[in-house]
């Protein structure tokens, strides 16, 4: 059964390079600040588990839909509302 | 009502800066079976058009938009600051110009076929009427695309820089006039639109997110314009144009190995390159 994941605790998506030509994508990851990255993944039979990897094997990035939300928020601040409507006309 | 047979995906007013006083523009293309590039002569009215590319209704709508955009185009060439409303017009124009080329229309119409073809063993024959219906659907969306509020923020909010080449250098223009490389949501996505041999519009994010909607001009260092020349050539579908004064064997060599090699608009895979 799916469990809600708090995206604020896991602000990144991650791609882990296994070094053998394969890589693994995770939608929820965090930078631990000590040279490691932890990903939150679904694992049977126990459900969700955390795995930690050395940071040099992980490519971390902001999830594109989170980044898109920041673009839209900025757009609403600059061009939204009555002021924005005046600017756009 | 006039029926337009030659529909310009690159409007005449945007082609004129590449013409000399006699209305001559040089085109560089790679013909099937030939090595290197082949030069030809063209002009602002001839180039950047295809017969019956758009329905007349779309052609008329685009003509109305172009009258407004031409004024903004001239302001950018003159180095004048754009008002907020003009930034919006220009952002819509960038998206419009991106979406109205024959190669974009054909690629979008063929997207379903491309996706299906990526599954081994899965075959589906598209009949001729189906293909035409898909092309009609895409051309019908050109105006919607430029009006899409979903895409406007990624263009209008970026920092806008008009690049000027170093002395003796220049830009070229491709049959894919607006080049967008990378996902628009990412800071490092590049929107590149050559305006004239001495002006190239770039929308970018300076110094990280959030961008500050700066409008500026920047003089490139010697040899830096070559990067944009090759990028534009690589992203062209079939050909590029240059001002007759800039036509040389050196340019042939500069674009020869990349012309039309990276013209795909849509990347079906999200797998990153390491």
Image (tube, coloured by chain):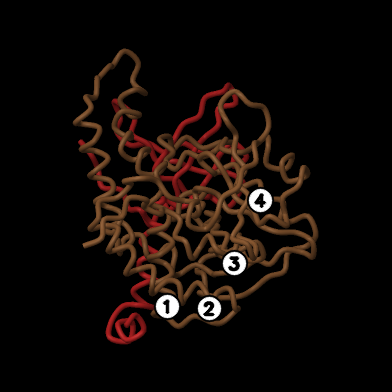
Chain colours: A red, B brown
Q: In the rendered structure, the residue with mark 4 lies on which chain?
A: B
Q: Kindly identify the residue that appears in the image at 53 percent across and 39 percent down.
A: B238
- The Cα–Cα distance between marks 2 and 3, rounded to whole angstroms, is 22 Å
Q: Kindly identify the residue that appears in the image at 53 percent across and 78 percent down.
A: B75
Q: Secondary structure at mark 2?
A: helix
Q: Which residue is mark 2?
A: B75
* Mark 4 / mark 2, whichever is N-terminal: 2
Local packing at callout 4 (Cα closer than 10 Å; few below 14, some 14-19, many 20+) is: many
What quarter of the picture does the C terminus of chain B occupy?
top right
Q: In the rendered structure, the residue with mark 2 lies on which chain?
A: B
Image quadrant where residue B262 sits: top right
Res B86 label: 1
Q: Which residue is mark 3?
A: B206
Res B229 label: 4
Q: Secondary structure at mark 4?
A: helix
Q: Secondary structure at mark 1?
A: helix
* Mark 2 / mark 3, whichever is N-terminal: 2
Mark 2 vs 1: CB contact within 8 A: yes
> Nearer the viewer's eye, disc 2 or disc 1?
2
Decide if residue B28 is on the left or right side of residue B149: right
What quarter of the picture does the N terminus of chain B occupy?
bottom left
Mark 3 vs 4: CB contact within 8 A: no
- The Cα–Cα distance between marks 3 and 4, rounded to whole angstroms, is 22 Å
Kindly indicate whether the residues beneath marks 2 and 3 are on one polypeptide chain: yes
* Mark 1 / mark 4, whichever is N-terminal: 1
Decide if residue A11 is on the left or right side of residue B165: left
- The Cα–Cα distance between marks 4 and 2, rounded to whole angstroms, is 23 Å
Kindly indicate whether the residues beneath marks 1 and 4 are on one polypeptide chain: yes
Can you give x and y, in whole percent of width and height, for residue B8 in the image? Answer: 40, 54
């Amino acid at each position: 059964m799916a469990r809600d994941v708090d995206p604020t605790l896991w602000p990144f998506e991650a791609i882990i390079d296994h070094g053998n030509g394969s890589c693994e994508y995770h939608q929820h990851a965090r930078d631990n600040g000590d040279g490691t990255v932890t990903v939150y993944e679904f694992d049977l039979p126990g459900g969700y588990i955390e795995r930690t990897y050395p940071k040099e094997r992980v490519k971390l990035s902001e999830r594109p839909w989170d980044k898109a939300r920041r673009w839209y928020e900025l757009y609403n601040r600059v061009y939204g509302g009555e002021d924005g409507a005046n600017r756009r006309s | 009502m006039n029926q337009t047979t030659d529909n310009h995906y690159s409007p005449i007013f945007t082609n004129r800066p590449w013409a000399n006083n006699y209305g001559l523009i040089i085109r560089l293309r790679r013909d099937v079976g030939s090595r290197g590039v082949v030069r030809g002569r063209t002009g602002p009215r001839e180039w950047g058009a295809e017969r019956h590319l758009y329905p007349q209704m779309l052609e008329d709508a685009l003509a109305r938009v172009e009258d407004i955009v031409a004024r903004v185009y001239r302001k950018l060439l003159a180095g004048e600051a754009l008002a907020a409303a003009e930034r919006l017009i220009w952002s819509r124009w960038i998206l419009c110009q991106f979406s109205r080329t024959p190669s974009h229309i054909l690629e979008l119409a063929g997207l379903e076929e491309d996706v299906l073809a990526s599954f081994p063993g899965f075959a589906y024959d598209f009949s001729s009427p189906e293909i035409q219906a898909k092309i009609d659907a895409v051309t019908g969306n050109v105006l919607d695309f430029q009006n899409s509020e979903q895409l406007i923020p990624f263009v209008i909010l970026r920092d806008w820089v008009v690049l000027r080449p170093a002395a003796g250098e220049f830009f070229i223009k491709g049959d894919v006039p607006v080049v967008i490389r990378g996902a628009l949501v990412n800071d490092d996505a590049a929107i590149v639109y050559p305006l004239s041999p001495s002006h190239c519009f770039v929308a970018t994010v300076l110094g990280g997110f959030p961008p500050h909607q700066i409008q500026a001009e920047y003089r490139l260092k010697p040899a830096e314009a070559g990067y944009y020349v090759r990028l534009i050539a690589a992203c062209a579908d079939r050909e590029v144009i240059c001002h007759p004064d800039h036509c040389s064997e050196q340019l042939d060599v500069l674009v020869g190995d990349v012309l039309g090699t990276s013209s795909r608009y849509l990347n079906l895979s999200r797998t990153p390159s390491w």
